[in-house]
Amino acid sequence: MILSTENILFNELKHHLHFIINYVGQYQPNLIEDLQTIGSSLTDVYTGNLTVVNIKHQIINYLHKNHIFYSDDYCKWINEDKCYRIVKTEDNTNWILRISDNKEKIIHIHPGRDGKNIFRVKGETIKTAIAFVYYKNYEKQSIELNKDVINDIRIKLNISPVKHFEKTKILTFISLLNSIQKNLIIK
């Protein structure tokens, strides 16, 4: 079977800012479980304007233009060079391509670090920020953004509390989510 967007493994909740914003604006019955898929290590979040569908189409188009049509071709191509490849989308964002353990979704993609349209942050920070914005906006909870509230959320997520809240990227990521959400509502 010829490779298609269905063969791409991409954790949108971990790597795509606009997906995250849509996610926090909808009812999430499995919020805590969903957030566990993010992990805790450093991760790169794509902040550009391409949709998940558009990114996947551009990756598949690149592969097909380079005569990579089947899983075997893809695996051979990836293994020829450091077990990963870098593909650039039309907005000049670098995407890392690897081989997934999932045979149906053999093409594992994520944004390249330190590139254009990329925000680098720890997974625990993403999880905390998503949970805070979700609880505040979707559930309309009247909660303040302070160290105690953030640490309560982190306990629910099974994450260590923060000691110095003012110096964390959690504030930056929450501000980013909130500012983009406001812009989406205005438009």
Image (spheres, helix red, strand yellow):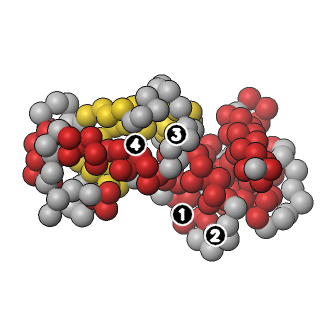
Q: Is residue 58 left or right of residue 29?
A: left
Of the residues shown, which amino acid type is indicated by label 3? Answer: Tyr
Residue tagged by mark 4?
A: 110
Q: Is residue 105 left or right of residue 163?
A: left
Name the N-terminal-most of marks 2 and 4: 2
| x and y percentages locating residue 110 in the rendered image | 40, 42
Q: Residue at x 88, y 50 (%)?
A: 144
- Asked if 46 appears above or below 127 in the picture, the reply is above
Residue tagged by mark 1?
A: 34
Q: Which residue is more in the foreground, 85 or 158?
A: 85
Q: Secondary structure at mark 1?
A: helix
Q: CA distance from mark 3 to mark 1?
A: 19 Å
Query: Which picture quadrant has residue 169?
Result: top right
Of the residues shown, which amino acid type is indicated by label 2? Answer: Gln
- Asked if 185 appears above or below 89 in the picture, the reply is below
| x and y percentages locating residue 70 in the rendered image | 13, 54
Q: Secondary structure at mark 2?
A: loop
Near mark 3 (Cα within 10 A), the count class, few <14, some 14-19 or many ≥20, is many
Name the N-terminal-most of marks 2 and 1: 2
Residue tagged by mark 3?
A: 46
Of the residues shown, which amino acid type is indicated by label 4? Answer: His
Of the residues shown, which amino acid type is indicated by label 1? Answer: Asp
Query: Which picture quadrant has residue 155?
Result: bottom right
Q: Secondary structure at mark 3?
A: strand
Q: Secondary structure at mark 4?
A: strand
Q: Is there a contact, CB below 8 Å, between mark 3 and mark 2?
A: no
Near mark 2 (Cα within 10 A), the count class, few <14, some 14-19 or many ≥20, is few
Q: Nearer the viewer, mark 2 or mark 1?
A: 2
